[in-house]
Image: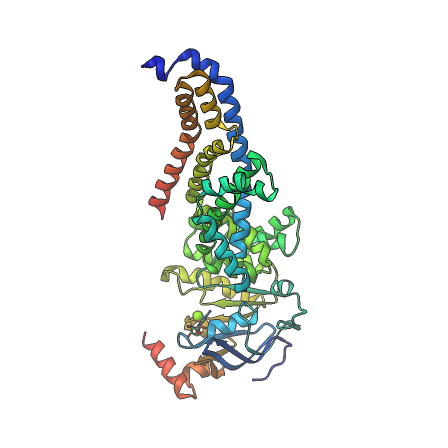
Amino acid sequence: MLDTFFNIAIMRAAWPILLAGLGNTLLLSATVVPLGLLGGLVLALLARSRSRWVRWPLMAWVDFFRAFPPLVLLIFLYAGLPFAGIELGGFGCVAIAFFLNTGAYYGEILRAGIDSVPTGQSEAARSTGLTRGQTMAFVVLPQAVRNVLPDLMSNTLEVVKLTALGSVVAMPELLFQARQAQSLTYNPTPIVAAAIIYFALLWPLVRLLSRLENRALRTG
Amino acid sequence: MIVEAPLIVEARGIHKHFGALHVLKGVDLLVAERELVFVIGPSGSGKSTLLRCLNRLEEPSAGSVMVDGIDMLDRRTDINRARQRIGMVFQSFNLYPHMTALGNVTLALRKVAQKPRDEAEALGLAALDRVGLRDRAGHTPGQLSGGQAQRVAIARAIALEPRVMLFDEPTSSLDPELVGSVLAVMRELRESGMTMVVVSHEMGFARAAADRVVFMDDGLIVEQGPPAAIFAAPQQARTQAFISQIQRH
Ligand SMILES: Nc1ncnc2c1ncn2[C@@H]1O[C@H](COP(=O)(O)OP(=O)(O)O)[C@@H](O)[C@H]1O
Ligand SMILES: [Mg+2]
């Protein structure tokens, strides 16, 4: 049993392959999370536009990418777009698919955060002569982010987990590497190792998140 | 009323509609330099809306607003520069909860008045000193009592050296024992010659400190005059009803 699922020799052999996968998972997360946050911020700010010609297409955009399964989106980009002569490569496809999907989620979270800041805050800021942009940057956004920090973190957690989808488009992230190692060694140990690595990576985030959530429950 | 000092606030013919709701129905409010005008009236009569039209937090539907010689409604006016000259204090303080008291006071000094950090902090500490809270500079709003928070809000406004201060029910959300400290700061401001427009229910303060009391009802100024005259011998039936009602409390 131990030899099947926890074979030390195989673990050792697979280690460099898994580490390379972990590196790619981290690189992918470090690309997609900031991109998604940035896209989400743009969506959240545009959602406050007074013009419905801005707001309606935006709502449609957000709804569309929240409803669209990211795996389907990813496979479409990877396997569908080449028929139109567009080759984005594994990394490009994952980055774009996740940006579209996760940006829409971050956008909704940030929009709720901005809405949660009382209007008196921006009125006070504007009454001292701050511009709309300064008011957003120095007064509203810091409070908005603080108010939805648990949601932002839990979305980030989902994004990191979702990077495993990259394996279906041959993106050499952690899961893909683990499956490579598994098929080379005819042994499931690399998958177990990958699971442990995912857990070690995400568990501190989960802990932090539940502490934040408990604090929010106590204070709010 | 004989106006001798130059006018700081000249609002004329102000109308404000919120959709179908006609909230201000042609209000003229002229305030001379160093004058303290005290605005009273039933809830919903348009007092807050009038104040907010003066610094264009609300856009009047019609009328003109000049403050310190600046046309507040002219599209070419740099509204953010103009607002530096008009301090505003709100019923709910509206301090920035993620900043210290000093951070609250220095934000506009740095970003609007463009002062370097050390100069802004010196000015901010001076403003906090003026409201008796220099020793609270490092506290966040959550660590302050309501009275202290409102005084920090006053410091935030006066740090920009405004030409006129607008107060919208500054003591209405305070516990009774904390009202005095805020009124004392307002008295000191008044004695230093600040031009002030105050919406409030603190009739004692009005008697002691106001030059003129303005009674509003249903979007119009119904009656105005010196506090003694308005409180002791109101001319209009609506003013009489309002005064006798608040004096019963
Ligand atoms: N932003 C707004 N949208 C719609 N109605 C408003 C708004 N602000 C104020 N009102 C309405 O305008 C009227 C006057 O309000 P306000 O100026 O706050 O009165 P007061 O300060 O004298 O109590 C009230 O009926 C209020 O409901
Ligand atoms: Mg009001």
Ligand 1 falls in quadrant: bottom left
Residue A83 on image: x %, y %: 57, 42
Point 40% across, 28% down: residue: A199
Q: Quadrant of residue B86?
A: bottom right
- Quadrant in which the C terminus of chain B is drawn: bottom left
Horizontally, is A69 left or right of B188 in the view? Answer: left
The one of B158 and B231 positioned closer to us in this rendering: B158
Task: Answer above or below: position of A59 versus A156.
Answer: below
- Quadrant in which the N terminus of chain B is drawn: bottom right
Colouring chosen for the image of the structure: rainbow
Horizontally, is B24 left or right of B249 in the view? Answer: right
Horizontally, is A184 left or right of B1 in the view? Answer: left
Point 51% across, 33% down: residue: A169
The one of B75 and B102 positioned closer to us in this rendering: B75
Residue A131 on image: x %, y %: 60, 58
Residue B121 on image: x %, y %: 60, 48
Q: How many marks?
A: 0
Task: Answer above or below: position of A75 versus A199.
Answer: below
**Extreme residue in the right direction:** B76
The one of A52 and B188 positioned closer to us in this rendering: A52
Residue B140 visible somewhere in the drawing: no
Task: Answer above or below: position of A185 versus B58.
Answer: above
**Extreme residue in the top direction:** A9
Residue B163 on image: x %, y %: 61, 67
Point 43% across, 47% down: residue: A148
Task: Answer above or below: position of B109 versus A72.
Answer: below
